Image (cartoon, rainbow, N blue to C red):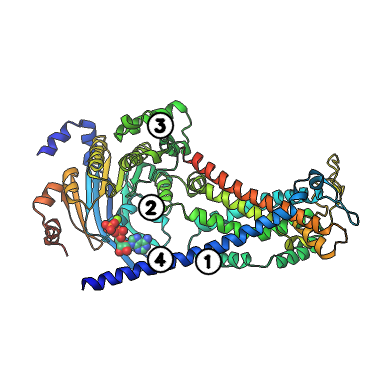
């Protein structure tokens, strides 16, 4: 109930967009080395402005799935993706999909904060410049808006030309988020973005995630922290041994899991 | 039980101490040996090496008091030419091997070939260069033949250094670039190369030291004669024009070899010692520069 009132305040435009999923997978599977099946038969949908958590034990294919969504798995030579991944109304899992455009609209944040060895400003402007934005004023705007969105602006606005490596771990991670937001993505993928951070930094990232979703971006986050999943996500998918065992509204999954295996995992009786 | 553990701990500590002692002795031995060698070479040639007339003078065939002017120039000129040819080639090869074709069979074969090449005796490289550049291409004993022989000599080392520098850039940096929709090329050029640059520059300068001191690869390619150079000469086909790449050019290292094997000048030992000292000082300088530049570039690239 609470969620519905919250959504109402986000405005009608976002509301209308939310009915249609921005990203959906049909029967997605992944094989490594032709024989090793890491993932099979995944059918999930992700709507705009929604946060989806992917949870499950280690090695069950969460990262593998996430890396399918922006086709990062294509960079691994022996990795093969089956099934359909529908983004913006068309299947992107085709050989002639333009990876470079796709990855601008589906951004990714990694487990270990990985800013470039450049200044804070250059970290953000680098990709837009490569994609052809040259105007200095426009770039400055991008720097400010994306840092504001990532809740980092106040902390770094006076040292934009300092090295990104002079920042703390949590700040670096928010810089990486800002760098992704600078591309104006529709979807942001996050692979355990807080696992290298302390609780305070984790909370500030969670805040940031809430804000990003408020902008109408679909956030998909892998996490090992069950409480985090409960705190921040609208939907939760539980992965086990390369399959999705349970998927639904976070409240429902946590309060009344349909599958016995999900229940075991959530109550810590797993394994 | 408790005394058992105690005994074990004290034994482990003792062993650790002995191992540390032995390792330190080995290091000290190597260090003293090398330091003594360097000091000896520089000391025995110092008198000549810091004498301007020796550094710029004309070599003598039969008289006392010859200099090493042309040899000194030839060494640097050859070095620069070799680097101009071998750095871009090595950079391209290393980038391809690490970023574009990691782990496939062709890469594996190429890597093996490069390793074999890097252990090829340099006299073999020299004779190969003699056959190919001097005879077959008809370039004669010339700077250009020498530069290509040195390139063959230098590429394996340089490729390995650049490869290692690129491999040491964390994978997360590649992922970051690609995930922003950059191409592999953009990621390599703008992210990976700058990050690897300090190590690459250090490697290039260190390899320059090796090239600078190389003799065997040059004896039959760049030749063993050093006509006096005329720096006012702009006729690029004249053998006295310093920039003419088709003139024979003896270098410092070759000069040492030649003077000792067939020299008849009376002050042979002094000239040889002086040349060796000059060579040694140059190589030491290369090493110091390598460290300094590597650090500076590193700091600059990370915007610190
Ligand atoms: N590059 C790869 N090559 C071969 N197999 C891989 C590769 N990456 C992952 N795998 C395999 O795929 C399976 C799923 O791995 P994945 O990294 O997706 O798990 P995960 O759910 O993200 O685990 P964790 O929670 O530990 O991050 C594992 O069995 C793993 O061994
Ligand atoms: Mg993972």
**Alpha-carbon distance for marks 4 and 1?**
42 Å
Label 2, secondary structure: give it.
helix
- Disc 3 within 8 angstroms of ligand 2 (CB): no
Q: Quadrant of the N terminus of chain A?
A: top left
The reply to whether discs 3 and 2 touch (Cβ–Cβ < 8 Å) is no
Q: Residues within 10 Å of mark 4 (few under 14, many from 20)?
A: few
Depth check, mark 1 against mark 3: the one in front is 3
Residue B147: quadrant of the picture: bottom right
| Numbered badge on residue B17 | 4
**Alpha-carbon distance for marks 2 and 4?**
50 Å
Residue at screen point 53% across, 56% down: B163
First-in-chain label (3 vs 2)? 2
**Alpha-carbon distance for marks 4 and 3?**
50 Å
- Give the camera-side residue of A145 and A44: A145
Is circle 4 on the same chain as circle 3? no
Can you give x and y, in whole percent of width and height, for residue B53 in the image? 82, 44
First-in-chain label (4 vs 1)? 4
Which residue is disc 2 drawn over?
A: A72
Which residue is disc 1 drawn over?
A: B108
């Amino acid at each position: 109930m609470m969620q519905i009132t919250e959504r109402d305040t986000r405005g009608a435009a976002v509301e209308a967009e939310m009915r249609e999923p921005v990203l959906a997978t049909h029967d997605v599977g992944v094989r490594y080395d032709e024989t090793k099946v890491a993932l099979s038969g995944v059918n999930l949908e992700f709507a705009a402005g929604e946060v989806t958590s992917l949870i499950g034990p280690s090695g069950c294919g969460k990262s593998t799935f996430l890396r399918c969504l922006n086709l990062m798995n294509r960079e691994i030579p022996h990795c093969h993706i089956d099934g359909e991944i529908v983004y913006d109304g068309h299947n992107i899992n085709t050989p002639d999909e333009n990876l470079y455009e796709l990855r601008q609209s589906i951004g990714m944040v990694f487990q270990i904060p990985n800013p470039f060895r450049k200044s804070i400003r250059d970290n953000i402007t680098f990709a837009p410049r490569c994609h052809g934005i040259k105007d200095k004023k426009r770039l400055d705007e991008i720097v400010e808006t994306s840092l504001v969105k990532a809740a980092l602006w106040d902390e770094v606005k006076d040292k934009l030309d300092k090295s990104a490596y002079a920042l703390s771990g949590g700040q670096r991670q928010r810089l990486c988020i800002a760098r992704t937001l600078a591309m104006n993505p529709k979807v942001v993928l996050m692979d355990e973005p807080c696992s290298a951070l302390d609780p305070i930094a984790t909370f500030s990232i969670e805040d940031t995630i809430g804000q990003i979703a408020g902008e109408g971006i679909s956030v998909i986050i892998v996490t090992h922290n069950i409480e985090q999943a409960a705190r921040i996500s609208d939907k939760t998918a539980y992965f086990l041994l390369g399959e999705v065992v349970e998927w639904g509204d976070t409240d429902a999954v946590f309060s009344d899991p349909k599958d016995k295996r999900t229940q075991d995992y959530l109550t810590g009786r797993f394994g | 039980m408790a005394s058992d553990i105690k005994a074990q701990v004290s034994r482990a500590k003792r062993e650790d101490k002995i191992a540390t002692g032995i390792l330190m002795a080995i290091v000290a031995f190597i260090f003293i040996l090398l330091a003594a060698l360097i000091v000896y070479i520089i000391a025995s040639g110092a008198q000549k090496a810091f004498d301007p007339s020796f550094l710029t003078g004309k070599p003598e065939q039969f008289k006392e008091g010859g200099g090493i002017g042309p040899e000194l120039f030839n060494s640097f000129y050859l070095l620069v030419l070799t680097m101009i040819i071998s750095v871009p080639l090595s950079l391209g090869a290393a980038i391809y091997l690490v970023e574009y074709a990691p782990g496939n069979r062709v890469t594996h074969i190429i890597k093996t070939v490069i390793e074999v090449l890097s252990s090829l005796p340099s006299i073999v490289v020299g004779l190969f260069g003699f056959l190919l550049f001097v005879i077959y291409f008809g370039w004669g004993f010339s700077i250009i033949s020498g530069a290509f022989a040195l390139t063959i000599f230098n590429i394996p080392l340089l490729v390995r250094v650049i490869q290692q520098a690129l491999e040491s850039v964390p994978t997360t940096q590649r992922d970051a670039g690609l995930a922003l929709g950059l191409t592999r090329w953009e990621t390599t050029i703008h992210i990976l190369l700058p990050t690897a640059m300090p190590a690459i520059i250090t490697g290039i300068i260190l390899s320059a030291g090796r090239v600078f001191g190389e003799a065997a690869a040059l004896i039959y390619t760049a030749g063993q004669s050093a006509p006096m150079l005329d720096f006012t000469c702009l006729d690029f086909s004249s053998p006295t024009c310093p920039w003419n790449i088709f003139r024979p050019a003896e270098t410092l290292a070759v000069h040492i070899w030649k003077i000792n094997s067939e020299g008849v000048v009376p002050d042979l030992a002094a000239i040889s010692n002086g040349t060796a000292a000059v060579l040694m000082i140059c190589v030491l300088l290369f090493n110091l520069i390598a460290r300094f530049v590597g650090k500076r570039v590193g700091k600059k690239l990370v915007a610190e």
